[in-house]
Image (cartoon, rainbow, N blue to C red):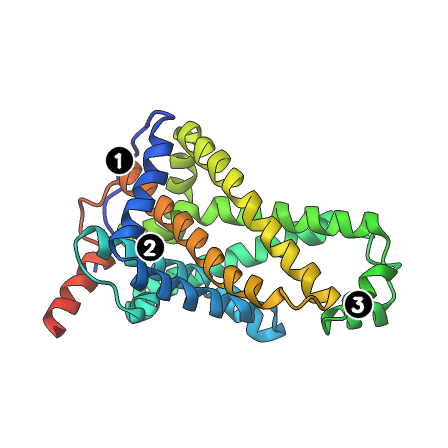
Amino acid sequence: MNEQPQPGIRRLPAARGLAWITGSVDLVRMQPLRLLLISLFFQFFLGFSQADALGLLIILCLPVLSVGMLHAFYNVERGEKPILAVLFTAFTVSKSLSRLLLLGALVLFLGLLIVSFMLAGQMVDVDIEVLNRIEQGDLDALMLIDPKLIEHAIMAMAVGAAVSGTISYFSVPLIWFRQQGVGQAIQLGLIGLARNWRPLLLVGLVLGLLAVPVGLLFGFFYLSVLSGNQSSSWLAIMMLLVGPVFQLLLFGTQYLAFRDIFGLETGGAAEQKGGDDQLVA
């Protein structure tokens, strides 16, 4: 399978960002239960990212699982009904899989490098036993660490996640839908972000505002759990639904932004996979 030619990169007005958000809502409304189930399983696998070696494997496979979410919206837009197995669709295309795993490794390495650089020399004074207690989930051990160090650690992780997310935002769909190589996908993805910073900034602002109540809900839930509040059960149910729904909004917006900026005219792994599915059906 030959690589696709370099796609054209459109420059769109700022107002297009709102169209991506509303369009994402419309796509979710077309298949709400199926998309919600897929999103729940995506969240389930993300939960393992806290578990040592398995966590690194999940983070490494994050671009592969992200393809599954994007492909689900691709199916919905075409009038198809996505099944749960769509989450693992990229695992069935070896060439795209290897590229996505390589991208995951690069993004993981870069994120760890940024965090290590920003925290260089600051973790020396922290007792190893305290770190072990934190790794085991002992939240009381956080009280033994300098609050400024915690702030720096949160900032470092946020910067690392922002840089990693910026690199992979368009490179993941470029690898899957347009069969670009990793280096070319990263380059084109960054160009696409730069040319369309206005609508993407608007998307970020709107989704950021929507994320505030979601973040408050998560914070209130953890405080309720720590205080032994009996109301934490219904809060857990709300979190179980609100988190995946917001996640669907994010992926739907990403899919529509990619479609409008890069287009889906040429056949890639997505269309070949769709053809295979039709043959199987």
- Secondary structure beneath label 2: helix
Amino acid at dot 1:
Gly
Tag 3 residue: 131
Instruction: Determine contact: label 1, label 2, CB under 8 Å.
Output: no
Q: Nearer the viewer, residue 275 or 205?
A: 205
- Secondary structure beneath label 1: loop
Instruction: Determine contact: label 1, label 3, CB under 8 Å.
Output: no
Residue 187: x and y in percent read 41, 41
| Residue 180 visible, this orientation | no
**Which circle marks residue 171 in the picture?**
none
The N terminus, quarter of image: bottom left
Residue at x 39% of width, y 42% of height: 189
Q: Earlier in the sequence, mark 2 or mark 3?
A: 2
Q: Is residue 10 above or below residue 1?
A: above
Relative placement, left or right, of 142 versus 111 is right
- Spatial distance from mark 1 to mark 2, Cα to Cα? 20 Å
- Spatial distance from mark 1 to mark 3, Cα to Cα? 49 Å
Tag 1 residue: 8
Amino acid at dot 3:
Leu
Q: Is residue 254 above or below residue 64?
A: above
Q: Nearer the viewer, residue 67 or 240?
A: 240
Residue 238: x and y in percent read 51, 60
| Residue 87 visible, this orientation | yes
Tag 2 residue: 70
Amino acid at dot 2:
Leu
